């Protein structure tokens, strides 16, 4: 028996209907990015591993897909190295390239390589797939699309404000109620200082970033394993449990971080962003969340995360400021801030809430029935005229029984069918059938086009 083919786990096929839904999401995001002056770029699916590795933290580096060198990739590897089975060492010897893990690091590489061509501040957006060697589960895939918008070459916090407006506008247009969460890595650094564990900043952020997923007890256990003392952990608890309005949280955390200069700087930045957004009409609420950590090491200032309110799902948008990212490619001091929409998770949210408008499917509006060669030749110029007017139409390719062609139209949800038989051919007209109401009408080509176009 021939074995049926299968897809790699964590990947998906998309039917025409599903692609129409996904394009609705991409087009909505693309339109909003353009409204705010962002320009589109693309980067290769492949990047040098030297570009990717060391940018996402130890856990992130493990999830980078590595690609074997072409040709005899084992030539430079000794038998002893193979027998040692040290996969990290072997990967470094036989793999020079990897699939991109996100769009931000390739963008930083792009900026450094094209610096002389760019006008700063440079506002770019990018909509492309990324790959992560993660364990597949609901809402988490090995191949998925990101829709990123970034600004480089500006330290202004107005960029953060604008990005939050973009987030709010996109989800308002999609009809999804969301919680937009804000924190600042400087606040997290200040917290690490005041609890007496400044050197454990990365361990603390990695652990508390999992708070929603594993709970406070498991987070505390992970902190113990990372070497934090019981006193460190005890001093952290009231901060993680802090409640109240954004202003109340800012006032309280400012008091907690009174001895931390960097922590107070983070409070000041967060206050500016939240206060400025109060002056901008927004559909969704902003929330200061002091447990938000965003585990990626390159963030240095404000960080953001968005979650849907009406269906269970992980983060569907995230981002933040990364002042030092281009420095790793030889261009220090170039500040950047960006957001990334997780299109695949947004797709799942819209499916769960059934929020796709009917017009987003852009299916065929009109099918011309094929009754034979003479009738077909009469239909083809009308079909061309329809397309010139923007009417999406098909001509059935084969001469077949009427029932079969009508079944095709029904299966494709085509609202109108045009029929040319002997009598219609003699009159130079077409029989137009409304597949929803069942009404039929003999019309001239111009009238047919007006009816189907809705004019």
Image (cartoon, grey):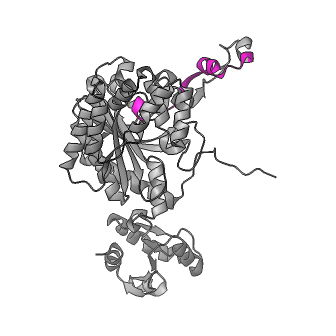
Q: Residue at x 49, y 20 (%)?
A: 50
In the image, residue 133 lies in the stretch drawn in magenta = no
Res 397 visible? yes
Span shown in magenta: 83-106
Is 70 located above or below residue 217 in the figure? above
Q: Picture coordinates of residue 196 (x, y %)? A: 41, 23
Is 376 located above or below residue 305 in the figure? below
Name the foreground residue: 140 vs 14.
140
- Relative placement, left or right, of 161 versus 234 is left
Quarter in which the C terminus is drawn: bottom left
Name the foreground residue: 221 vs 366.
221
In the image, residue 86 lies in the stretch drawn in magenta = yes
Q: Residue at x 52, y 34 (%)?
A: 220
Q: Residue at x 25, y 39 (%)?
A: 251
Q: Dividing the picture into quarters, in which one does residue 91 lie? A: top right
Name the foreground residue: 299 vs 109.
299
Q: Dividing the picture into quarters, in which one does residue 148 lie? A: top left
């Amino acid at each position: 028996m021939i074995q049926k083919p299968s897809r790699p786990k964590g990947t998906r096929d998309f039917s025409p209907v599903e692609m129409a839904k996904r394009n609705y999401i991409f087009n909505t995001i693309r339109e909003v990015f353009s409204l705010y002056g962002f320009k589109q770029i693309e980067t290769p699916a492949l990047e040098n591993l030297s570009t990717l590795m060391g940018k996402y933290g130890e856990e992130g580096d493990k999830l980078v897909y590595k690609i074997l060198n072409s040709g005899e990739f084992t030539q430079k590897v000794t038998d002893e190295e193979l027998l040692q089975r040290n996969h990290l060492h072997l990967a470094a010897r036989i793999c020079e390239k990897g699939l991109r893990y996100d769009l931000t690091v390739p963008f930083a590489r792009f900026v450094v390589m094209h610096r002389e061509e760019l006008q700063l501040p440079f506002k770019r957006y990018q909509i492309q797939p990324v790959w992560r060697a993660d364990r597949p589960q609901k809402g988490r895939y090995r191949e998925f699309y990101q829709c990123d918008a970034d600004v480089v070459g500006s330290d202004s916090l107005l960029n953060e404000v604008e990005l939050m407006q973009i987030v709010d506008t996109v989800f308002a247009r999609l009809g999804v109620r969301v919680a937009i969460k804000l924190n600042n890595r400087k606040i997290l650094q200040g917290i690490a200082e005041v609890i007496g564990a400044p050197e454990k900043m990365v361990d603390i952020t990695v652990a508390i970033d999992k708070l929603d997923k594993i709970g406070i007890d498991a987070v505390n256990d992970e902190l113990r394993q990372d070497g934090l003392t019981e006193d460190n952990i005890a001093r952290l608890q009231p901060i993680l449990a802090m409640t109240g309005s954004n202003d109340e949280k800012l006032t309280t955390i400012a008091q907690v971080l009174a001895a931390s200069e960097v922590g107070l700087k983070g409070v000041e930045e967060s206050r500016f962003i939240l206060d400025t957004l109060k002056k901008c009409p927004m559909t969704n609420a902003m929330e200061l969340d002091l447990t938000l950590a965003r585990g990626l090491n390159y963030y240095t200032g404000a960080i953001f995360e968005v979650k849907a309110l009406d269906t269970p799902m992980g983060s569907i948008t995230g981002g933040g400021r990364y002042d030092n990212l281009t420095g790793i490619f030889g261009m220090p001091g170039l500040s950047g801030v960006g957001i990334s929409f997780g299109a695949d998770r947004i797709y799942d949210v819209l499916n769960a809430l059934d929020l796709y408008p009917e017009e987003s499917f852009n299916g065929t509006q009109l099918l011309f029935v094929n009754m034979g060669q003479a009738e077909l030749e009469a239909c083809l110029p009308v079909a061309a005229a329809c397309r010139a007017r923007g009417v999406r139409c098909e001509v059935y390719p084969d001469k077949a029984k009427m029932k079969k062609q009508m079944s095709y139209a029904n299966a494709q949800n085509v609202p109108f069918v045009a029929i040319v038989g002997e009598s219609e051919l003699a009159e130079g007209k077409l029989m137009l059938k409304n597949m929803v109401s069942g009404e039929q009408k003999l019309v001239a080509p111009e009238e047919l086009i007006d009816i189907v176009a809705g004019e």
